[in-house]
Image (cartoon, helix red, strand yellow):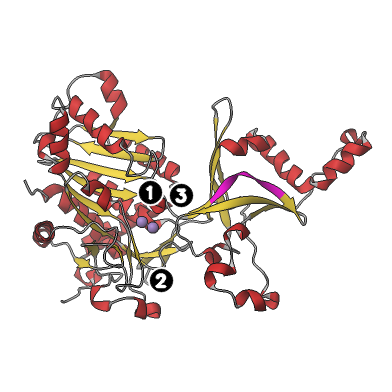
Amino acid sequence: MERKNVWETYNDRQIKELEKLCAGYRDFLDNGKTERECVDTIVNMLEDAGYTELQKAVLKGGRLKPGDKVYAVWMNKSVAIYRLGRRPLEEGLNILGAHIDSPRMDVKQNPLYEDGGFAYLDTHYYGGVKKYQWVTLPLAIHGVIVKKDGTTVEVNIGEEEDDPVFFVSDLLVHLAGEQLDKKASKVIEGEALDLIVGNRPLVLSENDKEDGKKEKKEAKEAVKAGVLDILKKTYDVEEEDFISAELEIVPAGKAREAGLDRSMILSYGQDDRVCAYTSLKAMLDVGKTERAVCCILVDKEEIGSVGATGMQSRFFENSLAELMELAGEYSELKLRRALARSCMLSSDVSAGFDPSYASYFEKKNAAFLGNGMVFNKFTGARGKSGSNDANAEYMAHIRKIFEKKGICFQTAELGKVDVGGGGTIAYILALYGMNVIDSGVAVLNMHAPWEAVSKADVYETYRGYKAFVEEADLT
Ligand code: MN
Ligand code: MN
């Protein structure tokens, strides 16, 4: 089947629109490096677009009408966004879904220690990472520390030009003969991913030194004491407060245009914020629709969609029940019907074909950067294990919509059969009996600290999502 490079299809107006969308996307990446930061950014965008918080709408009472816009946030990490259509919810929604968590290193609950003159934060990696990629990079700390009195301290260090950054060390090559003979999965082990956060001892003032014993004791861990002193002065937090903190270690720095032709974006966290942003933008930009439109942006996909903020949580279903109640059409049966009659694009990044590693891909069924939005009829590993395998009828329906709207798309699998695989949130929504298909954007070096996408694919995917929410309907 013929492949088309979508850049060749654009006119000047489209290029301008593409650049504007991608500039907004880069801002989104820079402002949302954790799921909490993403939700904050998304809520700001929703409020600007006239959306109301669902609980506020519930408290206010009254009846929602076609075109009304509401959103529900769950634990500051997941969000469900709705816009009512002209037809009742019972007839089904057109749903866009993506995840906003990304692989990273999380700070442990008892993290701070001193060794060899360095203060360290001990970490536990989150999601699938090649651990050796996370050493000797400038890293930033993002997250929250919640104190016993319930106040939340927001932390964001390492992104501003004059902020300090942090790093994980690696053995110098001169001494690495034995290390380099190890398997790549063992070269850097999980417990070696400890973050260096200081090297300067706290110098006690004369007043503090009156008691000779005390002086000696404190000098033992003076670098750690120095770090704690800074944390106390800057954030008014104690060492014990790490117990109730969520601190994420991510690559420091902004999303950048990549290539002399500026055709790509290189950034941390594009899995899956590239689909989250394009889904959200499509939803915000679409006009009034027949069917209700929904966008679900969730946490915890990288560790199996578990927990209260992952897709397996009842949070989405509950918010839809609330919405139906507000629209004056709730019943358990109508909720079931609404879910079963919905159409969903479960969006996640796809493995972009990498010529340097061509043997891991099956070229006819690989996603290429610059060839448009990707559909994966199925994902999974080995014999499609763990996959949502979309119906041919549904794929045909989408083909028709995309052809009508002139959207370029490609179909792909995640690498060669038997080489590996991966899962998404698709199978979870499919539990309701709705039509779901995996789709999204091709990414090069997925799950690496810096991932690459094609700007043309970002634009084409945005267009595809918009076409989908306007047109999809299998009832
Ligand atoms: Mn993903
Ligand atoms: Mn992933």
- Please, what is the three-letter code of the amino acid marked with disc 1? Ile
| Residue drawn at 13 percent across, 32 percent down | 333
Range of the magenta residues? 106-113
Q: Which residue is mark 2?
A: 259
- Report the side of 119 relative to 267 (left or right): right
- The image shows residue 23 at horizontal and vertical percentages of 36, 55
Front residue (pair 14, 390): 390
Q: Is residue 160 visible?
A: no
Q: Residues within 10 Å of mark 3 (few under 14, many from 20)?
A: many
Q: Which residue is mark 1?
A: 100
Q: Residues within 10 Å of mark 1 (few under 14, many from 20)?
A: many
Q: Which residue is mark 3?
A: 33
Q: Is residue 336 visible?
A: yes
Q: Earlier in the sequence, mark 2 or mark 3?
A: 3
| Residue drawn at 37 percent across, 66 percent down | 264
Give the CA separation, mark 2 to mark 3: 23 Å
- Please, what is the three-letter code of the amino acid marked with disc 2? Gly
Q: Is residue 368 above or below residue 26?
A: below
